[in-house]
Image (spheres, coloured by chain):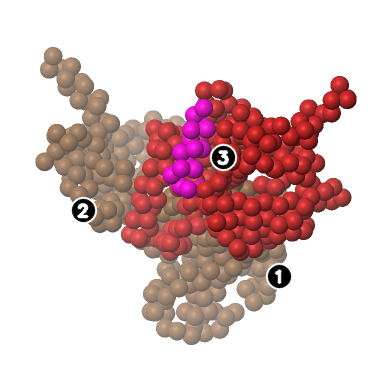
Chain colours: A red, B brown
Amino acid sequence: MTILRVHNMSHDFGGLRAVQDYDLEIEIGQIRGLIGPNGAGKTTIFNLLTGIYTPTKGEILLDGKRINGLPVHQIASMGISRTFQNLLLWRHMTVLEHVKMAHYSRIRYGLIGAFLGTTKRHKEEAEIEEKARKLLEMMGIRHLSDQVVLNLPYGAQRRVEMARALATKPKLLLLDEPTAGMNPEELVQIMEIIRRAHHEFGLAILLIEHRLKVVMELCERIQTLNFGEVIAEGTPEEIQNDPKVIDAYLGKESVI
Amino acid sequence: MASTTTFRTFRAGWSRVPLIGWLFGALLAVTLERLVGGPLALAVGLPKIPALFGLDIMLKKPLLIPNAVLYVLLVYGLPMGIATRAGIAPANRLAARLFRLPIVVTTVVYIGFLYAIFHVWAEVNDYRALVLKLTLIAIMFTLSLNVINGYMGEFSCSHPGFMALGAYCASVFSLGLFVDTRFFGTALLPPALGPFLFPVALVLGGLLAAAGALIVAVPSFRTRGDYLAIISLAFLFIVKSLIENLEYVRGPRGLSGQPDWANLPTVFLWTVACIWSINNFVRSTIGKALNAVRDNELAASAMTVNTRRTKIVAFLFSAFWAGIAGGLFAHVLRYVNPSTFGIQNLAEVLAMVYFGGLNSVYGSIVGAVSISLLGEALRPLEIFKWIIIPLLLILVMIFRPTGLIAFKDLDVTSLLRPKQNPGGEV
């Protein structure tokens, strides 16, 4: 079953066309990759899907409902969650608070509960905390719950971001270069975590990644982007041998 | 062997005094002062009981400093020191017993104790009562500003404006309905009813301030930082010049003769309500969203946080409490005029917030109390007061840029916990 369908989406920054006639269909439980050289428009596509930019043209359907033009938080609570390339964490907040915060849209106690500290609020906060701790356990960072994120090593910060994204209960998870800046050991761990999240929550995942090893191992299908356009789409093997992809990454043979 | 044990218990003893022990000690000290303070002051060579822990005497008559210090030691230091240490075991037993009650009941008991201390202390003279009431109001005002400047990380300059709205709204309500005045005519309702409707007056003031806050909250959707600070400053000037030119509330002459309803218990209860609700709010996930918006707004919205709702709630809530503080302020001084709510007032409350500490209820209390008391203590220095307080602020900013006690949660439960290992309990 298709969970996300993007049809003919384009986006302009002033006179510059950043994304051109982009199409995408993701099924439930699928892991897909999005690769391409720097500036190809990968992160722009993520920003379009999550509502940070509104597409100039085209349509985004989540579960058959049109979501372009909706505010970011609404799209997020409908089931698209993401991590950021350059780790956008809240620097004064603890790990646990990060994960609890991602439950925001499902809080039922309202402002009265927040101001007056009703029993309903304490019960609900306790439930959220319980869930958050479970998620941190799964991510292997439960022991860091009460640490302020600013003091954590880079790899742990990546995990916090991932835990936070999963806590919104997404149907589709967008991972923007989840292995950037990681050493080989951390790389193996994060791939394991992605697999586990995928397995346990039955998520669809869309992955931007520069390390081909990661993409080739994780993804079922891969799209290659260059100058805002999809130049190739297929299984990892097909992509690896596609001359257009090799061109985009390495340049034409004749140039050398 | 025995002496080292005694020494150890002596030292450890101070850290094991539970909150209730300190409250008992303080209550004992103020009761003692109430009973024998006058003769004792004369005995140590002071003309009368020093009003603010001797601070007020020290600058006026430096020669009396040793006497004042001696008095403070005899009245506060010695009784509190002995009582708290001697009473550790019973105090901890009592704390443990109280701790087993529902948390609401326990908190009420503690607050009752705190009030008793304030009450006895303030009974000694009117000046004390006034300083105490103004300090409590300063706590409310500082805390409400901390919601915006600390928790949400915007720089609001509009809070004196919110306070002015609250002060004027409450004053018009009480003067118009319950007092015969030249400008509002005769009283419409029997004055005996007044004290019961005083909360209504305050809440109306708070709501008017919250409505005014919309003018700052809506632009905050699109602007942040310096630009929003300028907008909020503009709001302050709008409110001030509006009141100055509004003949209905007597323009720059101000309103006077407010009924004397803001007595110590009233101000105290409102302050408790303010601290309680703001502390509740900032510790809930909905309130923590303020921090998320401050630290990274984009990430907050991508994690389902409704940032507009968060901002509007923060502004309205904080303005509401600033308005309540304003209403109380007007009824404590029984006089308001627009020039009270100018840049000077803004500078004072900003000093309290940044001195005490951002993003912290403790910080706001510490900031408001220390700057208020310092202001009173330095009063004899007149103009130099405004050199010393800013200098202190500069020092704090250099050595602790976020304030004395920043980023610390006020956890009531851990505050009330008895401080003894379970083995020694009943």
* Amino acid at circle 2: Leu
Determine the residue located farthest toward the top in the rendered image: B1
Chain assignment, label 3: A
Task: Give the camera-side residue of B296 and B115.
Answer: B296
Look at discs 2 and 3 and give the one toward the viewer: 3
> Which mark lies nearer to you, 1 or 3?
3
Which marked residue is nearer to the observer: mark 1 or mark 2? 2
- Residue B167 sits in which quadrant? bottom right
Give the residue drawn at x 38%, y 42%.
Answer: A134
Number of residues whose C-alpha sits closer than 10 Å to that of mark 3, classed few (under 14), some (14–19) or many (20 or more): many
Residue A210 point in image, percent of width and height: 66, 32
A191 magenta-colored: yes
Give the chain letter at badge 1. Answer: B
Residue drawn at the location 42% of the way across and 83% of the way down: B190
Vertical arrangement, residue B165 with respect to residue B405, above or below: below
Q: Position of residue A6 (x, y in %)?
A: 68, 55
- Magenta region: A188-203
Circle 3 — which element? loop
> SS of the residue at dot 2?
loop
The residue singled out by tag 1 in the image is B245
Residue hosting label 3:
A89
Q: CA distance from mark 2 to mark 3?
A: 40 Å
Q: Residue at x 39, y 42 (%)?
A: A133
Q: Which residue carries the number 2 mark?
A: B101
Type of amino acid under label 3: Leu
Q: Is residue A129 left or right of residue B83?
A: right
Q: Quadrant of the C terminus of chain B?
A: top left
